[in-house]
């Protein structure tokens, strides 16, 4: 077997160790992305939210539920016709001014879903949104952890 | 001796590609199409439906074009949009006396040089801040979009009559500033092939013009071209170089950030980059945040709430964010013992954050464009909102596309930007410091980048 001269040997060793660092970092990143995180889940319950809708704004704008909860949303429009359309769910209801519209559904998937006004209600109508959070915002936590890992790994490589 | 540049592939080595670049008709045809779209946008804005989501001016400019710019034009083609932008066409026609190719006629105009004090990116930064101040109105109200576009074309003509070359594009156009700053990340570049050939060619027809075409409308001497922001890809130098020494290269992404490219780093451009970083946070909060009061304040221009919004917007983009950035750079200097002057350190580091800024704009755009894209089909059939149904799509119901995938794409884009900039911050620090000190210099800037990404993620997903 041919013996490498010391300099080339050191270069090869450094390359190999760098490769290992990348493999380890990639492994940690994969774990951060796919590992199921334990979080407290209470038994399914029924939640009712009363949302006031007026031009470009829902109050409250963020709703919370646990996976499996049954959720009733009562939507009251205080100016023009608004609505409540929930991403990822078959939920779409329209509220006439002064009248209460009601919709009940099951929060069957965990995650954060936008709800939007489906009725053209003014210039900023396309941006009239709110958030419906089912369980913890795992995507935000995972992304944050990946960000931390990115910073840590960059420094580790140059340590 | 110069460090050799990383991989470059000369696409002009392909005869068909060289023909495409030298021929005037393909580019003119593309510009004619964009000019028609531009004029139609103005007409739709001024005379079409006042409802933004039913009007071509809003949907095609602020949803379709704005998305295409960040998904396609900039990341793949740098200033490729500037290559076919219709805004300077009329002014250039008057300046040069020809529209498609030189015909011996002379144009008119005072041909004054752009004022020395304004030869920087501050005007463009200011123009982009103005867009931010009035964004909630401009981006949603068709008549305002129509007037803004009309104003842009009038300003471009007026400046072309008074000042030489494309002064408007280079120093005034807010989108020119945005595209120019981020064009550095693209995997293509127009450069010279052999410096010795340029040195030996005394006529410099690429700069002065000749019977084959105009001198560089951007006032750039191709041998001195080291960064994409100084080249509008108008391709005149490809046509006027008698030596075939101007080439169009494929290169690694962000080739201008590679120290070997020796691209100039200027404080005013760095300032523009930090302003754009602040603007994307503000845009995200106004359009994708769930704070109705903020949207209402941003929309009601002239109201007390709007003045409060304007004060907060300016304080955040000109004070808070640049202040935090400067604090991070200062902390890095203290930790590393870097002797680089503070102004230089700020400038160098701002360039390194360019990929993060671009990815933040891309993430912000993705966060709404997939949800809003379904508005485009009805408007295609009824662009003025007058009840037409040209292609049978007027009644297509609006439904957000891929709502489950959107937050994942946004998160991946932002984290990708953080990684990319992290690498760039480290390699920039390595230009002046040994490895360990470079890591200490980079650490606070990376924490700044991480905090920026976390805030953006919190708003968008």
Image (tube, coloured by chain):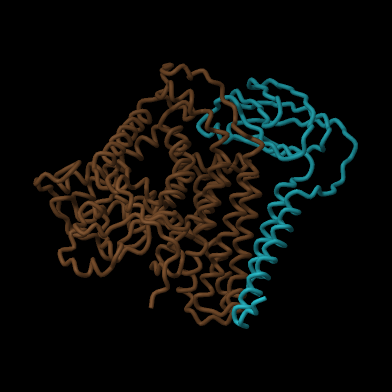
Chain colours: A cyan, B brown
Q: Which of B428 and A56 lies nearest the eye of the viewer?
A: B428
Quadrant including the C terminus of chain B: top right
The answer to whether residue B394 of the structure is visible from this angle is yes
For this rendering, which residue is in front, A65 or B29? Answer: B29
Within the image, what quadrant is residue B271 found in?
A: bottom left
Residue A108 as seen in the image, left or right of residue B131 = right
- Give percent across and percent down for residue B414: 60, 52
- Quadrant location of residue B118? bottom left
Residue B368: percent from the left, percent from the top?
Answer: 56, 39
* Image vertical order of residue B162 relative to residue A78, above or below: below
Place residue B416 in its image quadrant: bottom right
For the point 88% across and 34% down, which residue is it? A44
Image location (x, y in percent) of residue B268: 40, 64
Which residue is rendered at x = 12% and y = 47% of the image?
Answer: B107
Could you tell me which quadrant the N terminus of chain B lies in? Answer: bottom left
For this view, does A107 lie left or right of residue B235? Answer: right
Of all residues, the one furthest to the front in this rendering is A1
Q: Is any part of residue B126 visible from this angle? A: no
């Amino acid at each position: 077997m041919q013996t490498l001269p010391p300099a080339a040997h050191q270069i090869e060793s450094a390359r190999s160790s760098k490769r290992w660092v990348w493999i380890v970092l990639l492994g940690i990143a994969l774990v951060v992305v796919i590992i199921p995180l334990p979080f407290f889940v209470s038994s399914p319950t029924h939640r009712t939210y009363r949302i006031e809708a007026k031009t470009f704004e829902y109050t409250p704008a963020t709703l919370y539920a646990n996976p499996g909860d049954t959720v009733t949303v009562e939507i009251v429009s205080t100016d023009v016709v608004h609505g409540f359309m929930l991403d990822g769910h078959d939920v779409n209801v329209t509220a006439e001014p002064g009248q209460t519209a009601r919709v009940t559904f099951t929060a069957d998937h965990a995650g954060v879903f936008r709800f939007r006004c489906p009725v053209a209600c003014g210039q900023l109508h396309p941006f009239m949104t709110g958030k419906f959070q089912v369980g913890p915002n795992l995507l935000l936590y995972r992304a944050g952890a990946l960000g931390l890992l990115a910073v840590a790994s960059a420094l580790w490589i140059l340590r | 001796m110069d460090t050799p540049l990383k991989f470059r592939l000369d696409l002009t080595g392909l005869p068909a590609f060289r023909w495409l670049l030298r021929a005037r008709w393909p580019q003119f045809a593309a510009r004619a199409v964009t000019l028609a779209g531009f004029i139609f946008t103005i007409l739709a804005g001024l005379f079409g439906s006042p409802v933004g989501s039913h009007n071509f001016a809003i949907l095609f400019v602020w949803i379709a074009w704005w998305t295409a710019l960040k998904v396609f034009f900039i990341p793949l083609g740098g200033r490729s949009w500037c290559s076919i932008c219709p805004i300077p066409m009329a002014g250039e026609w008057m300046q040069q006396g020809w529209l498609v190719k030189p015909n011996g006629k002379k144009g008119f105009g005072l041909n004054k040089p752009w004022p020395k004090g304004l030869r920087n990116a501050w005007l463009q930064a200011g123009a982009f801040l103005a867009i931010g101040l009035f964004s909630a109105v401009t981006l949603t109200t068709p008549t305002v979009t129509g007037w803004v576009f009309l104003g842009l074309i009038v300003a471009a003509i007026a400046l072309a009559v008074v000042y030489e070359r494309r002064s408007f594009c280079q120093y005034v156009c807010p989108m020119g500033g945005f595209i120019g700053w981020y064009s550095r990340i693209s995997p293509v570049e127009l450069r010279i092939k052999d410096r010795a050939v340029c040195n030996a060619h005394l006529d410099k027809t690429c700069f002065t013009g000749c019977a084959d075409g105009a001198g560089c409308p951007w006032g750039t001497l191709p041998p001195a071209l080291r960064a994409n922001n100084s080249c509008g890809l108008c391709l005149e130098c490809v046509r006027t170089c008698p030596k075939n020494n101007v080439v169009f290269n494929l290169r690694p992404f962000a080739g201008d950030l590679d120290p070997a490219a020796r691209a100039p780093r200027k404080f005013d451009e760095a300032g523009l980059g930090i302003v754009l970083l602040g603007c994307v946070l503000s845009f995200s909060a106004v359009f994708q945040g769930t704070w109705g009061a903020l949207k209402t304040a941003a929309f009601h221009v002239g109201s007390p709430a709007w003045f409060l919004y304007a004060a907060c917007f300016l304080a955040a983009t000109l004070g808070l964010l640049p202040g935090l950035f400067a604090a991070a750079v200062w902390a890095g200097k203290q930790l590393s013992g870097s002797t680089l002057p503070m102004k230089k350190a700020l400038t160098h580091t701002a360039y390194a954050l360019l990929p993060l800024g671009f990815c933040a704009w891309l993430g912000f755009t993705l966060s709404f464009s997939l949800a809003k894209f379904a508005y485009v089909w009805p408007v295609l059939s009824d662009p003025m909102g007058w009840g037409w149904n040209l292609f049978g799509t007027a009644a297509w119901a609006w439904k957000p596309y891929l709502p489950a995938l959107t937050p994942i794409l946004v998160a991946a884009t932002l984290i990708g930007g953080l990684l990319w900039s992290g690498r760039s911050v480290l390699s920039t620090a390595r230009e002046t410091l040994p490895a360990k000190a470079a890591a200490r210099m980079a650490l606070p800037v990376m924490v700044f980048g991480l905090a920026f990404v976390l805030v953006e993620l919190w708003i968008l997903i």
